[in-house]
Amino acid sequence: MVRRHHEVRRGAAGLAGALAVALLLAGCAAERRTPAATGGGAPGVTATTVKVGGVLTKTSASGYSTKDAEIGAKARFERANAEGGVHGRKIEFVGAEDDGQDAAKGDAAARKLVQKDQVFALVPVHAPNFGGAAFLEQQGVPWFGWATGPQWCGTRTGFGYNGCLAPKKGAGSQTWWGRQMADLLGGARGRSVYVQTTDSSGSKYGGTTISQSFAAAGFELVGVNSGLPAAAPPPDWLPYVNKIMTSDGGKAPDVVVSVIAGTKFNVGLYSALKRAGYRGVLTDATSYDAAILKDPASAQALEGVVAAPMFEPFESTAPEIATFKADVEKVAPGATLTQHMAIGYWAADIFLDMLTKTGKDLTRARFLATADGDYSYENAGFGRIRFPQDHTEPNGCGALVRLEGGAFKVAKSLKCFDNVPLK
């Protein structure tokens, strides 16, 4: 401040005293907002901090919630801060807004974080119907999370920790789920698969890419149903069950894939299928959640289900998972580990790596130039990520976990596979 005062005094020689004071105050205020170390205007950045916040679906009509992603992100940020921050800047995490699984609320939440809270980036964003993508892209604000819908894809500012899960035709599409399942079952030859989605855009896109993943692995696709309303579980599952149970030439398929966001949905579908006598393999992307084991009815419905997380399972002996567990324990002692925690954690981890590689002279423009400039990062916790490539295709990595006897067991450890063009 003394140096700035002297500079103003010399430059303002001969001016009225009141003008000199005004210039001094303006200079001090500007220094607090955008210090010289940032290299220019950098919202959310000071000489010692970088401010971030997230948008999650903490509440929803169906009961689906991603609130634990906030714990995961906080855990990773706290470790970074304990290690001295990034280039001398600590992460100021303001927490996450709730979009209530409503696109308009998600857009409002994104605007609040950027315009009112002045965050540098949104971390984590974990909301199936997130509506703030267009605003963030227009404003050039980076955002990180689980790329569950097409709003993540083809952007320059949205960074899914696992890439883009809704690629356009001709772009790379994942094969890992089908190939991991084929390995688990001893081969796909002669085995059939049926895919159930909801009528939401994200679920439909997922149904398309996952169907191709199983087809690429050698399974016979015998049906895809996207008629299930996404708003709430149906009062009667029988129409959906009947279609599934007769989809393979009048008999049940070998594998049923549920592309549905919400434990209540899956519990309802799986319970109805088991009552109808289904004996094949049930698999989805969301049932790897220890919290469901506290409910006996849910645990029974999900017994035997093969979940497909896009990160290394908590039951793994990998050192990266041991670090993850220790980090979470520090910020949320005794907390049950959930998939959403992992998603928040790995999204934050990638953000921190990009922040480190950007350097001390930090602006959003410089950050995005680094992130989209032939960027790559590998970590045994989530696999690999490559940008700008993964703005248009998934990272191709995933694991399988089976619920057996009321406990999760690693069925297939995390592995990455080459993508194939989406048909």
Image (spheres, rainbow, N blue to C red):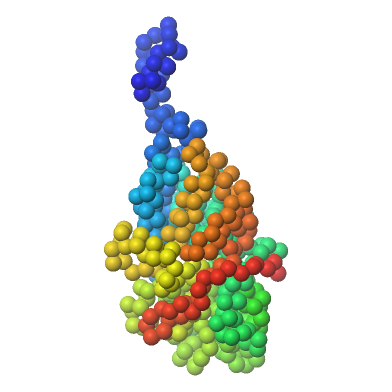
Regarding residue 65, the answer to whether it shows in the image is no
Q: Who's the residue at 52% across and 70% down the image?
A: 414
Q: State the image coordinates of residue 226 (x, y, percent, origin top left).
A: 58, 75
Q: Residue furthest left?
A: 333
Q: Nearer the viewer, residue 268 or 323?
A: 323
Tag count in the figure?
0
Rendering coords of residue 72 (x, y %): 39, 60
| Image location (x, y in percent) of residue 311 | 49, 67
Q: Which residue is rendered at x = 64% and y = 78% of the image?
A: 217
Instruction: Residue at 62% x, 53% y: name it.
Output: 388
Residue 183 position (above or below residue 23) = below
**Which of the 4 quarters of the picture holds residue 334?**
bottom left
Quadrant location of the C terminus?
A: bottom right
- Residue shown at the point (37%, 49%) measured from the top left: 83
User: Where, by quadrant of the figure, is residue 30 drawn?
Assistant: top left
Give above or below for 289 relative to 141: below
- Whether residue 415 is visible to the viewer of this picture, yes or no, is yes
Viewer-side residue, 101 vs 190? 190
Residue 52 horizontal/vertical position (percent): 42, 48
Q: Looking at the image, which residue sits at the far top?
A: 14
- Check the image and report above or below for 216 versus 395: below
Q: Quadrant of the N terminus?
A: top left
Question: 142 or 342: nearer the eye?
Answer: 342
In the displayed structure image, the side of residue 56 where residue 249 appears, left or right: right
Drawn side of residue 237 relative to residue 91, left or right:
right
